[in-house]
Image (spheres, rainbow, N blue to C red):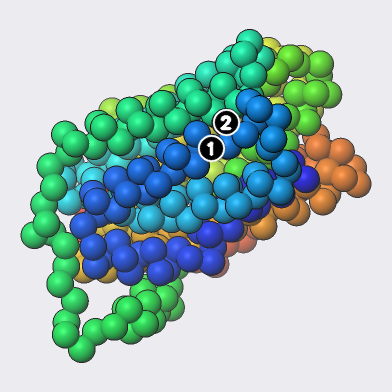
Amino acid sequence: MVQLTGTTMWAPLLLGGALGGVFADRFDRLRTVQWQLALLIPMVVLIGFLESIDQLSVWMIYPFLLASGVGWVGDMTSRRALVFELVGTDRIDNAMAYEAFTLASGVAVGNLIGGSVAQSFGIGEAFFVVAGLLLLGLVSLNWVPSDNSAVRSPPSNSSTLTELKEGLSLARTNTGLRSILGVTFLANFFLFSYFPAVQRIGDRIGATPSQIGLIAAMTGFGMMAGSFIVGLWEPERRGLVYISGVAFGMIMLVPFATSSSVPMAASALFIAAIGSGFFGATQSTLVLTIVDTDMRGRAMGLLSMAIGALPIGTFLLGEIAEQIGASSAVVTMAVSGLLLLGVWVVTHREVLGMRRSAEI
């Protein structure tokens, strides 16, 4: 049931990513991100209020997570294409690395604050704090310049369905993009699906709620470190860094899942997340530079669909954990993912040779 919450939140990426990419190419991307936050904040407040008065039922959590996932589709497809518009090709490596850095910072700080506030004051109060942080994010977007000229005007004979078909066809016609998407699919199915299991692994080693929050925050701190390194490094061989980050993260999930203490679990997850940071910092750059300008939103939509493998992997890990335990399930998924990643790269080598000089 814990894993099912992750499945619910990430399912819209798989089912609606391509459509979100069409909207990102048609509408003002900054406004899309702002609307996503503006609609999410009151829902977070409502959940916190219901929890604080002991009226929150389990069934209410799933529609909330589903709505959050729908918002995430619009946010992801629009936000990263917006970053490209703001900085241009010459500075995209730094920009995307630091975008990944700030996203990881939110994961780290959010888990720390959530665990600490939930333990000290209550779960409902933790939701109120999250709503406040989301409001701060919404307000900060007022300082982002809006360039309406960057919004593509579709041809008069173009329809949403036509553009959706064009976006989906990218996976068939662009072999480089297909190679990238395959790695993303495997990473989200086998690597990132561990996250909801952190709670169960923390329980096994006797961690308190705040310690579990600390362990979970290591995902964010590790990704921050990996993203920051990429931002300073600006690697020439983006594709190699992308693949290596996934492989390294999968390898380090094994000592995390089999750890016997809080320090060991936190340290192993931090190191694993450095690899995830390498992966995340190069992912969007590879996608945005392998397609034409007017297809970037739809390419990001396909990327979000590949990320949509996460709910399936999350649910599968939960089912395996029911049979053999959370720790063994994480190890099983990580080892399987590592083997399949090797097979994919051998049969789809395009991503391995991608360099900064090869961008469109």
- Amino acid at pointer 1: Leu
Residue 144 x %, y %: 17, 39
What is the count of numbered marks? 2
Q: Residue at x 53, y 66 (%)?
A: 15
- Amino acid at pointer 2: Phe
If the image is split into quadrants, where does the N terminus sit? Answer: top right
If the image is split into quadrants, where does the C terminus sit? Answer: bottom left
Q: Secondary structure at mark 2?
A: helix
Q: Nearer the viewer, residue 219 or 66?
A: 66
Residue 253 vertical placement versus 115 (above, below): below
Q: Residue at x 24, y 84 (%)?
A: 158
Q: Residue at x 45, y 35 (%)?
A: 277
Query: Callout 2: 10 Å neighbours few (<14), some, many (20+)?
Result: some
Do the residues bearing badges 2 and 1 touch, measured as CB atoms within 8 Å?
yes
Residue 46: numbered disc: 1
Q: Residue at x 86, y 38 (%)?
A: 325
Quadrant position of residue 212:
top right
Residue 198: numbered disc: none
Q: Nearer the viewer, residue 218 or 186?
A: 218
Residue 295 x %, y %: 27, 68
Residue 288 vertical placement versus 19 (above, below): above
**Residue 307 shows in the view:** no
Residue 40 x %, y %: 44, 43
- Which residue is disc 2 drawn over? 49
In the orientation shown, which residue stands out farthest toward the left? 149
Residue 330 vertical placement versus 179 (above, below): above
Does residue 101 appear left or right of residue 84 in this picture? Answer: right
Residue 296 vertical placement versus 275 (above, below): below
